[in-house]
Amino acid sequence: MMQVSGIGAAAFRSPGVFDGVAATRELSRPAEPATIAPAARPEPASSSNAELRAHALMAQDVYNDRASPPAGYRTASTAELKELGLDPAMLARGDFRARVYVGGTADNPTYTIAFRGSQSAGDWVTNLRQGVGMDSVHYRQALEIGERIGRSDLAGKVDFTGHSLGGGLASAAALAAGRPADTFNAAGLSDKTIEQAAAIRGDAGGSRPRVDAWFVRGEVLSGAQDGGDRVAGFVLGGIPGALLADAPPAYGVRHGLDAQAPDDKNWVERHNPVDKHGMDWVLNSLPH
């Protein structure tokens, strides 16, 4: 079985494409044509470059059992979660994990909810065998969080982020809450999930919140989303490649990042689409 070694910083356990693969079993087709923008952020935008990098660091940090928030942020207290309409149990159910980070100032706090994908490359085998079940549960949990946020008096101070499967979950929660998100190498969303989010939001015919979907050019999940089994079949082979061929693009306005290899990568890793899926490549490739 193919394994993906730890990617980059010790704080990050590599969440391979495989969590996104399982997600796309449940997520059939995108509801709207995806557009690909250059790395320079268009206007209007959800986040500044500094905020974008902070979101990426949170999307990486949520993989860790012990939080290490980026500079200027901390994790939310139980009392703060309650003010948002959340409780700790909602953020950790089975294999599902999310974390709330607090930024801003004491008088004017802001909140970012980051969703975790799968913990290891080996998880994709289990996900594929279990079919839609596991990921359907994950998406229901993300929609529930989005619904709670949308009802909160603090909704206007909240945004979302996530990587791979976590990016798909962040997109779903953002749509349900009516709030923006930055996602990274994210799984796509089905019409059904988007319709469920719109029903929760209460404006099925209204405008949707901004989701900026950032991806590293040449990484395996986005390559499969754009090129089907020409990429995935080569990298993964057999059944996984066939499943990836139907992967819908990440939801929202897509921004392609020219791949910038982290300094610690060897020749094989620098040319490996699976390795490029990791958050260390995202962080090294983001605009400054």
Image: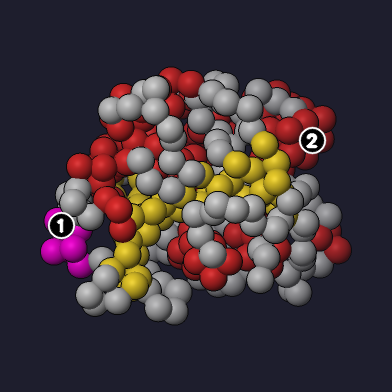
The answer to whether residue 284 shows anywhere in this view is yes
Dominant secondary structure (helix, strand or loop) of the stretch shown in magenta: helix
Tell me the tag on residue 231.
2
Frontmost residue, 197 versus 233: 197
Q: Does 46 appear in magenta?
A: no
Q: What element carries label 2?
A: helix
Tell me the tag on residue 256.
none
Q: Given the image, on which type of amino acid does mark 1 rest?
A: Glu
Q: Which residue is drawn at 76% across and 74% down?
A: 263
Q: What element carries label 1?
A: helix
The C terminus lies in which quarter of the figure? bottom right
Farthest residue toward the right? 267
Q: Given the image, on which type of amino acid does mark 2 rest?
A: Val
Farthest residue toward the front? 44
- Locate residue 75 relative to residue 264 in the image: left or right: left
Label 2, label 1: how far apart the Cα atoms are: 45 Å
The answer to whether residue 140 shows anywhere in this view is no
First in sequence: mark 2 vs mark 1: 1
Q: Residue at x 42, y 60 (%)?
A: 62
Tell me where residue 139 appears, x and y as whole percent: 38, 34
Segment colored magenta: 77-83
Tell me where residue 156 appears, x and y as whole percent: 30, 53
Q: Which residue is drawn at 20% across and 42% down?
A: 151
Q: Residue at x 39, y 53 (%)?
A: 159
The N terminus lies in which quarter of the figure? top right
Tell me the tag on residue 83.
1
Picture quadrant where residue 235 is located? top right
Picture quadrant where residue 110 is located? bottom left
Tell me where residue 56 appears, x and y as whole percent: 53, 62
